[in-house]
Image: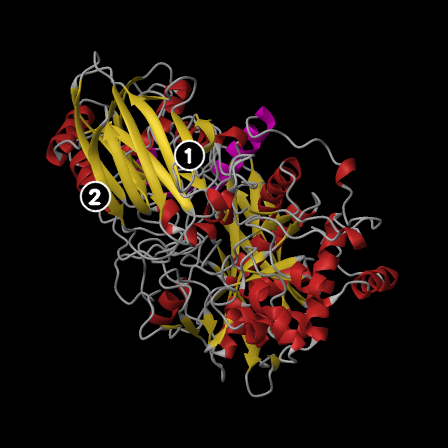
Amino acid sequence: MSAIPSSVPELLEDELRKRLASLDLEAKVRLLSGKDHWSTYAEESIGLRSLILSDGTVGIRGVRWTEAGTSINIPSATAIASSFDPELARSMGSVIGAEARRKGVDVVLGPVVNLQRTPYGGRHFEAFSEDPQLTASMGAAMVAGIQAEGAATTAKHFIANEAETDRMNSNSVVSEQVLREAYLRPFEAIVEAGGLGVMSSYNKVNGTPAIQSELITEVLEREWGFDGLVVSDWGAIRNVDAASSARGGTDLAMPGPRTAWADGLLDAVREGRVPERIVDGKVLRLLRLAARVGALQGIAPLVDRETLPTPPLAESRGIGRKLRDAGSKGMVLLRNEGGCLPLPPSVEKIAVIGPGAVTPRTNGGGSAAVVAPAAVPPLEAVKAALPGAEIQYAEGVRPYTLVKTLSAANGSAPGGPGVVLIDFLDAEGAVLGSERRHRCDTLTYGMGYPEGVPEDAVTAIRASTRLSVDAAGDYVFAAAGSGYAHVTVDGVTRLDDELVPINSDAVVGMSLPPQGLIQLSMTPERPLDIVFTYTPAQKTVASLRLGFETAAPDPDALIREAVEVARHADVALVFVGTSSEDEAEGFDRSTLALPGRQDDLVAAVAAVAPQTVVVVSSGAPVLLPWRTHVDAMLLSWFGGQEMGWALADVLTGAAEPGGRLPVTFPADEQNLPSPRPHDGDVDYSEGLDIGYRAHARAGTGPAYPFGHGLGYSAWDLSAMSIEKHAVGVDVAVTLGNVGGRESRQVVQVYVSRETTGVVRPALWFAGAAVSEQGPGAEETVTVPVPRRLFEHWDEDSGSWRLEPGTFRVHAGPSSADLPLAMDVAL
């Protein structure tokens, strides 16, 4: 995998400096704040056009968040990391990069290369792994894939930003050695791979705001030689002192136009509190990035987008096949007693249980979310894969409180097509503009309104729909959004109240909006006209949501119904998992237990079904108290838009479950690091002992260890050899497929040191290689282990040091199963 070159030729650097010199101070300062939520200012005098930025961890949303322009939705970062294959990460990066071209995006806000330090992290579905080396290799590969398509990346969030709780104000307390050996390592690898941008985070690091930390100026820029752009996380440069924040290493304040720099930086420079050379350096880095992506007239970009193939649409067949394959390679088979999976073609009766079978969660909540093409539910995909089977569905449990999104099955917009009519109102209630929405996932405004609607003039949003049902019964309508809600039903006010979110984080209003509920008794003969007038809370993005479903049934009755369906089946497929109420940007989890009565459901079904297969959809670890009482368990993560088809492939054996755990699944919630600040501090007191390393230190076993994953065949690791060279060692492992079908194995290499005079983990991951072979085949794979992975950071000298002596190198299929080992003296 070759890196995208990022160095700027001397002649080009001279040209950039000439253009910079032609700008006056006002123009330079203006360029350092965004023009709006997703774009930068243009400067025609030097041939600079506006740059378009967009979130892009699982898909490119673009400047508007609507179903009018669907986005390709790749599997979540945790699912990609489960492949342990940088080439798959590069391939998914190329999908993201091509999508950026299709949507006119210059700068992709991602990937996330923070570590899954604790399983409680609410946003960890966006992060690859708990391990720094696996995160580094996957992140660097994804960056290379994206940038090969012509867009720049901004690896995020720099640095020590592993918690969502009070993320704007918390202070990460972490030693220099731990920063160097763990949390900085992925960013360093991305710089080495040619990454063009970095995003600075909200939090403080050891008392200093990350946006102005010396880790940017002294480590990222001076030591690593990074000459790209550092952009702030959205809103990180607000409510801060313009002078002190500008003296730090962050270059671009987003979003605009109202930032601390836009308001105060010009005066700070004129008054001598900020040297103009600091402003010049920031603008120069912005111009370098613009040149690299083709936004600076007369300068050829690093990648000529015009010569690349036409980007595919989100609905294209080729993309579907690619994402389907990636999905299956990321799924982890945690348990498979008696070869329960794959399901035999002769299976006659299947019980499919759980709401995840009909409403799969394909991506995470918050800024990572995209509006993807309608996904095929796993229930429909399994029916298509096993057409001869009798399949019966039962809801089983309702583990969420957010009412299901209103759809075309029950909602229709008045006077024309669509599910809901949206009117944008000014302070007097006059309509500034309208649009019809055909899907009612969270409707987000303030990050781009319809053309012709003046954003600053919008004070309220009115959503109108007509509800209809096929069967008489009790239903519930939900009006959700952070702000004030007024709802009428057939002209009668039924809700008039302020809706207050769980915290002040604006993103929570998108992923977990507060909702007002209206109980309705309905018949097919009498539809109801609903008008929801929403006044967004001050200083927040406007996000509203309309929900509608049957009234909540008796939980015990749901489980009883599922048990009866399972009792008469040959196998029960039970779908459990988390939702945006449990895992999303803006808050952390308080428990690892599955929400609602899902554990009760699995236990009840397993007690009566001849065979029970559980499909777990989550972005990070969950507790599985019934794990030894079920026959098989498959972890599907948040599998992207092709999740349903990929699941059917794995369940039926059309594809191998190729994933291995990139995180540890704990057996209980004892002694786990907390993401929650104490007196403002998030204390990284576990040091280097993150995840599996803590178990290696203590000699304890989790529910499922880092690297664990089963396949549909059997493998034998028979030999190991090590070759030393100047930059590290090469570890060669011979393995063979001794089972009866083609299969995939991940050979993992770890290092330990029995006698040491420095602080280091008891065991640490060093690399992996993938082997895909037919039955009876044998192969020797090589895992390069760089010298850096044997070194430690010496805080006294401020440098990397190699402690002479003997290291033990291990190889095997997981961190807890390492049958091969050799000593190497360095």
Q: Amino acid at mark 2?
A: Gly
Q: Nearer the viewer, mark 1 or mark 2?
A: 1
Q: Is residue 346 left or right of residue 815?
A: left
Q: Is residue 694 left or right of residue 807?
A: left
Q: Is residue 332 above or below residue 357?
A: below
Q: Earlier in the sequence, mark 1 or mark 2?
A: 1
Viewer can see residue 219? no
Residue 31, numbered circle: none
Could you tell me how many numbered marks the image carries?
2
Tag 1 secondary structure: loop
Front residue of 215/131: it is 215
Q: Amino acid at mark 1?
A: Ala
Q: Which residue is mark 1?
A: 430
Determine which quarter of the picture holds residue 308. Answer: top right
Q: Which residue is mark 2?
A: 596
Residue for point 34% across, 27% down: 464
Residue for point 64% across, 35% down: 102
Q: Is residue 513 above or below residue 289?
A: above
Question: Callout 1: 10 Å neighbours few (<14), some, many (20+)?
Answer: few
- Magenta part, dominant SS: helix
Q: Which stretch is magenta?
A: 316-340
Residue for point 32% across, 47% down: 483
Which quadrant is home to the C terminus?
bottom right
Q: Is residue 193 left or right of residue 546?
A: right
